Structures are given as structure tokens and as C-alpha cells.
Amino acid sequence: MELKDIQNLIKFVAKSGASEVKLEMEDVKITIKTGSDEKETIVQHMQMPAQMPQQMAAAPAPAPAQPVAQAAAATPADSNNGDDSKYITVKSPIIGTFYRKPSPDKDLFCEVGDSIKEGDVLCIIEAMKLFNEIESEVSGKIVKVLVDDSSPVEFDQPLFLVDPS
């Protein structure tokens, strides 16, 4: 498989709307995942002919430009957080995927305006196929949800703003 073929495959998957495509051949394994706004391309080499590593190393990764743009776009919105200093920030204790519902057909754990108390489940974070319930450590009122449902989250990333008063 040549570099041009891989690039065409990436473009085709992006246009098709497929969420994940896996292609395995004798010497190459390619997985292309597309999400809401992010695209990830993983290429693994197995017993490659001498010419393949050079072609694969030159393969462009289209994804990095988008997350950087999203982070830059989010910065101006975060600059008006002067009013948010009176709120308590609930942060992610782990890396994983953030879910606001226990399952797709159930109601949200909490919404903006809901009163919560210590020990209430606020969300679930899936990490390594384990669903971890994130409980509130404070009582108060949900002011803002800072993460979209089914989004990846990092350790210590802010998830909710809670008004303790």
C-alpha cells in the first residue's frame, strides 16, 4: 500500500461519515477513527518491506490542526471566568470518556440548576472499559456543565461548576 492510497483512504473515510474503519493486510494494519470533531489515524507496521517505513513516516496526520484550533477558540470564552471564582470546580479524577447519563435511554444525572448534595453521582467516566461514577464532594447547585457528553476528558480537567451557597 502506497502513501497515496493511505491518503485517499483517509479522505474517503472522512467523507463517508463512518466512525471507524480497520484495514489489515499482511504487512500493514490501519485504523481510522472519526469522532464528533476529531479524527485519529493509527498506522501500525508489521514485518514491513524496506520501502514502507519511508512512505509511512511521510504520511500526514490531518488531526492535530483541529484540536489546536478548538483549544484556541475555547480560550476567549474562558477569559470571562472572573465571575466563576465564587464557584467550586468539580474536576475529573481520571482520564477517560465523560458521560452525563448512566445509559443512552436514561435521564441525565444532573442538569444546570439542579441542587446536589455530597455523594450524589454527577457523571460517569469510562476508562479501560470500566464505568466510574463520579460523586460530588460538595453540596450546592450546578451552575455550568463544562464538558460535552461522550467527550474525552483528561485528569484534573474541570467538569462542573457548583455554587456552594
Image: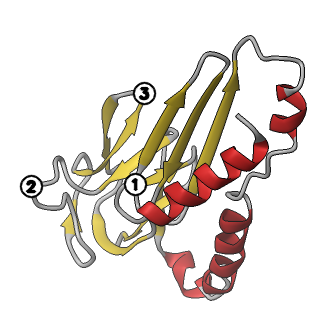
* Mark closer to the observer (1, 3): 1
Q: What whole-number distance in Å separates the C-alpha atoms at marks 2 and 3?
A: 22 Å
Q: Residues within 10 Å of mark 1 (few under 14, many from 20)?
A: few
Q: Is residue 109 left or right of residue 41?
A: left
Q: Amino acid at mark 3?
A: Met
Say which residue appears at 52% left-offset and 66% top-offset.
Answer: 37
Q: Which residue is mark 1?
A: 18
View extreme (top): residue: 47
Which x, y percent locates residue 72?
A: 72, 76
Q: Which residue is mark 2?
A: 105
Sequence-wise first label, 1 or 3 = 1
Say which element carries label 3: loop
144 w.r.t. 117: above or below? below
Say which residue appears at 29% left-offset and 60% top-offset.
Answer: 139
Q: Amino acid at mark 1?
A: Ala
* Mark closer to the observer (2, 1): 1
Q: Which residue is mark 3?
A: 128
Sequence-wise first label, 2 or 3 = 2
Say which element carries label 2: loop
